[in-house]
Image (spheres, rainbow, N blue to C red):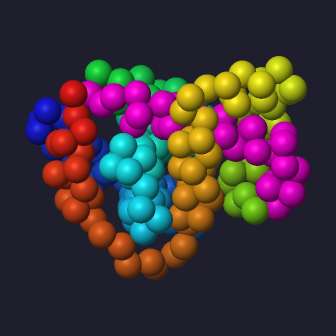
């Protein structure tokens, strides 16, 4: 397992600075999301989900200047062999959480970054009524919505936060 955490560490170190349409790099963004999760007292699985939610941008070539469109599904598939559902499912659902909130709370769109609004179109736009019902019935939907909150907030240039290594012990505890 340590080998996989080494692999994650290297991915963020080598590819985390690639642009993806935001003012911060993927690495800065993911570290800010994890710091926000910790600050709010989230459990370790959700802190890990916040840290790893955008790993899908680092394992495939980008579709355009906004990164990998299907990074939610790709990231979840990448993590599935190594982490429990409590980590993987909020990763898989963090884009769905955006589509859900835009559907049920239209004012939420105003809080999204330009890049998030751009990618929303590629991701299917606001959920339909049926999709909203399916999402709300998923036991991991609340975790996904929290990750999404941190996702939207963790885009501040130059913020000083803990590095990836600060989360290594936690990831080791969570790993299968
Ligand atoms: Fe994100």
Across and down, in percent, residue 61 comes to: 46, 35
Position above or below: 23 against 27: below
Residue 58 visible to an observer of this rendering:
no
| Boundaries of the magenta span | 82-110
Q: Quadrant of residue 93?
A: top right
Location of the N terminus (image quadrant): top left
Q: As rendered, which of 110 and 142 lies closer to the eye?
A: 142
Across and down, in percent, residue 37 comes to: 45, 59
Location of the C terminus (image quadrant): top left
Residue at 76% from the left image edge and 50% from the top image edge:
117
Relative to 87, 106 lies left or right: right
Prevailing SS of the magenta stretch: helix
Relative to 105, 155 lies left or right: left
Residue at 51% from the left image edge and 37% from the top image edge:
90
Residue at 25% from the left image edge and 56% from the top image edge:
167
- Total marks placed: 0
Residue 11 visible to an observer of this rendering:
yes
Relative to 117, 46 lies left or right: left
Q: Is residue 91 magenta?
A: yes
Q: Is residue 113 magenta?
A: no
Relative to 110, 83 lies left or right: left
Across and down, in percent, residue 16 comes to: 37, 53
Residue at 52% from the left image edge and 75% from the top image edge:
157
Across and down, in percent, residue 131 comes to: 77, 24
Q: Quadrant of residue 96?
A: top right
């Amino acid at each position: 397992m340590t080998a996989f955490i080494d692999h994650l560490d290297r991915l963020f170190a080598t590819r985390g600075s690639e642009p993806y349409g935001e003012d911060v790099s993927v690495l800065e963004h993911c570290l800010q999301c994890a710091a926000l999760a910790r600050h709010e007292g989230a459990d370790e699985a959700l802190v890990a989900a916040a840290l790893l939610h955008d790993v899908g941008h680092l394992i495939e070539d980008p579709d355009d200047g906004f990164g990998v469109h299907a990074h939610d599904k790709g990231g979840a598939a990448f993590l599935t062999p190594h982490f429990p559902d409590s980590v993987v499912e909020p990763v898989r659902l963090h884009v769905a959480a955006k589509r859900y909130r835009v559907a049920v709370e239209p004012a939420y769109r105003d809080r999204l970054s330009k890049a998030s609004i751009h990618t929303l179109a590629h991701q299917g736009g606001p959920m339909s009524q049926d999709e909203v019902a399916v999402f709300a019935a998923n036991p991991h939907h609340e975790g996904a919505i929290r990750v999404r909150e941190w996702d939207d907030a963790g885009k501040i240039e130059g913020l000083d936060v803990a590095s990836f290594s600060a989360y290594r012990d936690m990831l080791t505890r969570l790993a299968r």
